[in-house]
Image (cartoon, rainbow, N blue to C red):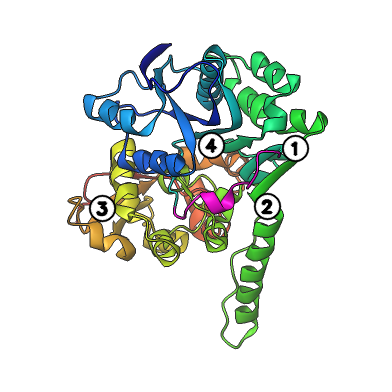
Amino acid sequence: MQVLFQNPQLRPGVRAAFCVFSHYDPHGTVEPYVRGYLAELQRCGFQVVFVSTSPRLDTESQEALRELTAAVILRENIGYDFGSYKTGILFLRHMQAEPSRLLLTNDSVFGPLQPLAPLLPAHDDFGLFGMTDSFDFSYHLQSFFILYGTPVLRSPAFATFWDRVELLSPEVPGFKQKIILDYEVGGSQYFLNHGFPVAAAFPFRKTLATAMDHYGTLLAAAEAPGGVAPAPLKVRFNATHSFWEELIELGFPFIKRELLLLNPTGADIYRWPDIVAQHSDYDIGQILAASLSFSGNNDVFFTTAPAEIAARMNEAGELVLPVNPTLQPWQARFGVPDERCFVFDESVYMDAHPDIRVAVQQGKLDSARAHFKKQGHRESRRVPLKAIPPLSS
């Protein structure tokens, strides 16, 4: 661990609202969207301990962080976000700081799309508070935003839990699953079992009810003459993926980076720029710039509905996609061509959906590609495309 910067005002025994911010960027850059998030955390009264697992931070980023944080720490890239959270907590313990509230958050979200302050607890006497919750494995707050109140921070349970958090190396078998089960899911369950209330600003139950209302509208339209049946509804417990649009409609201040870059659950994200613009004045250019930097490609400009992908795909799994019309205003700025060629990656599709692999192996399906074209595009499955050279005429 290396402390790159520490604000002189961060003295031993200081009592304040603190935030431990987990960061990683392969280029050693703190992107503008991250700086904007840090500035909003400052406006909410947090002193930010910025913990990065980047191999280095460039000079411009370091200078920006001096204005936005109370301390900047570099550490080895092990343990994912919980490793960075623990590093920041141990740093505050070393400084004998007395947090009145402590936020753990990271750079996995774009935003805030809305001011954060109105969403946070007004007083410090709460238990655990998050932006969203989930019922995957067991009830828990999602780890991109966890806020501890004073009663938790002053309890022996808090120190005991974080002392037990291990900085797991990727070489440990199943390390990612262990982090999720033991620390993300296990953390909420641990504090619930110790009598602390857990609450989310955007509970899954409320988000699901909003999604059901939307789906009911689709069903009503399908009942009309000439109506088209909607895709089967699949309820997944990660609302930031499955119900991202409903969340933004409800005032959720973020959109997940993973949703735009990987879309692991095959959600319909075709209109994400319009949805963000309808509910926020957030600079979409920051999202695009970070997406291009992080992914190394401009695939985000070619998001489209799964049904269109299936319709455009030839027998070899190849297709040409035009720029998403909602992103055309930024096309020239980022030098994106009008169209690009892609191929459907069958191996990734089968890895994401083991039932399809089994069906192909048993001869029940001709290919994973055939399944996607026939029905998979209607089942909210991940759509894995990879860029290829222009198709021959």
Residue 72: quarter of image? top left
**Does label 4 or label 1 sit earlier along the sequence?**
1
Q: Is the residue marked by circle 4 packed among few (<14), some (14-19), or many (20+) residues within 10 Å?
A: few
Tell me the distance, in whole angstroms, between the alpha carbons under discs 4 and 1: 25 Å
Asked if labels 3 and 4 touch by Cβ distance under 8 angstroms, the answer is no
The residue singled out by tag 1 in the image is 138
Q: Is the residue marked by circle 3 packed among few (<14), some (14-19), or many (20+) residues within 10 Å?
A: many
The mark closer to the camera, 4 or 1, is 1
- The answer to whether residue 346 is visible is no
The residue singled out by tag 4 in the image is 351
**Does label 3 or label 2 sit earlier along the sequence?**
2
Q: Horizontal and vertical percent for residue 38?
A: 41, 38
Q: Dot 3 lies on which element? A: strand
The mark closer to the camera, 3 or 2, is 2
Tell me if 79 is positioned left or right of 43 in this view. right
Tell me the distance, in whole angstroms, between the alpha carbons under discs 1 and 2: 13 Å
The amino acid on which the numbered mark 3 sits, given as a three-letter code, is Arg
Segment tinted magenta in the rendering? 113-125
The residue singled out by tag 3 in the image is 340
Q: Dot 4 lies on which element? A: helix
The residue singled out by tag 2 in the image is 204
The amino acid on which the numbered mark 2 sits, given as a three-letter code, is Phe
The amino acid on which the numbered mark 4 sits, given as a three-letter code, is Asp
Tell me the distance, in whole angstroms, between the alpha carbons under discs 4 and 3: 25 Å
The amino acid on which the numbered mark 1 sits, given as a three-letter code, is Ser
Number of disc labels? 4
